Amino acid sequence: MSDLDSATLEALRHVSTATLTTQLFKRGLRNTFMQGVAPLAAHSGANLVGPAFTLRNIPSREDIDVLELFADPEYAQRKCVETIPAGHVLVQDCRGERGSASFGSILSQRLQVRGVAGMVSDGPVRDSTTIAALGMPVFCAGASAPPNLIRHHAVDINVPIGCGGVAVFPGDVIVGDADGVVVIPLKMAADVAQAAAEQEQLEAFLTERIREGAALPGTYPPNDKTKAAYEEWRQKRNPE
């Protein structure tokens, strides 16, 4: 996590994925929000934030994907669970396949014990009630009971993948909230985090104006007069 400073981490814990996608759009990135990936349990409190550690799955094949495979510590799924660094987010490429689980409760428990920040998958999980009760943030495509070997064979760790239709490179910053998951290129994270915090402060002021009866023209987006009023409001709230 050395490339992701504490101030950036803290800022990203408290801004919405809606705001972050707006800031990324301003910088030319349009495809940053995962589709079909949602919080397994009701989201509350700070966001899931951490660098991506990826796992790539391909379709399973009957002569290879048998239960005995799980006994091999070098099998990519097992090796991933045992090597992902603390504070990172496991992100799985399941090709949007929903016919079997991508993870279960025992592996999720192991991730939590190892200090992993959370897990993101564009496939479902099994043991969903048990996983939700762990309190570790999990974002996925719902629940499915069949074991992952029915549809998945894990092949690569910490390589570029797709998840929810979004490219994810190792070390990209993952942020998850009640709306879902956004992917931020690491090189943009500090700038985007600061701009997102500033955007949300401005929007808090604009929301007050709208609540008080202001019309959209000149308020949202703000014209020069509204911007000047915002600066006065901001100075009163945050005197230097």
Image (cartoon, rainbow, N blue to C red):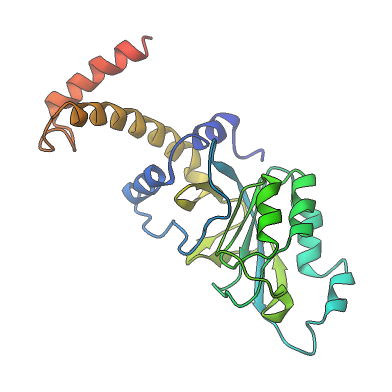
Numbered label tally = 0
The one nearer the camera, 27 or 144, is 144
Residue drawn 14% across the image and 29% down it: 213
Name which quarter of the figure residue 31 lies in: bottom left
| Place of residue 130 in the rendered image (x, y in percent of width and height, measured from the top left) | 71, 55
The x, y position of residue 14, in whole percent, is: 48, 34
Residue at (18% x, 20% y) in the render: 228
Apparent side of residue 138 relative to residue 68 in the rendered image (left or right): left
Q: Is residue 26 left or right of residue 141?
A: left
Q: Would you place residue 30 above or below residue 229 in this image?
A: below
Residue, x 31% and y 29% (percent of image)? 204
Name the residue located 69 percent from the left edge and 42 percent from the top edge: 87
Q: Position of residue 164 (x, y in %)?
A: 50, 65
Tell me: 141 left or right of 67: left
Above or below residue 62? Residue 112 is above
Q: Quadrant of residue 3?
A: top right
Instruction: Name the quarter where the C terminus is drawn.
Output: top left
Q: Nearer the viewer, residue 156 or 233?
A: 233
Q: Quadrant of the N terminus?
A: top right
Residue farthest toward the front in the current orientation of the protein: 129
Q: Name above or below for residue 29 compared with residue 14.
A: below
- Taking the image as shown, residue 63 lies to the left or right of residue 225, namely right
Provide residue 133's location: percent of width, then percent of height. Answer: 68, 48
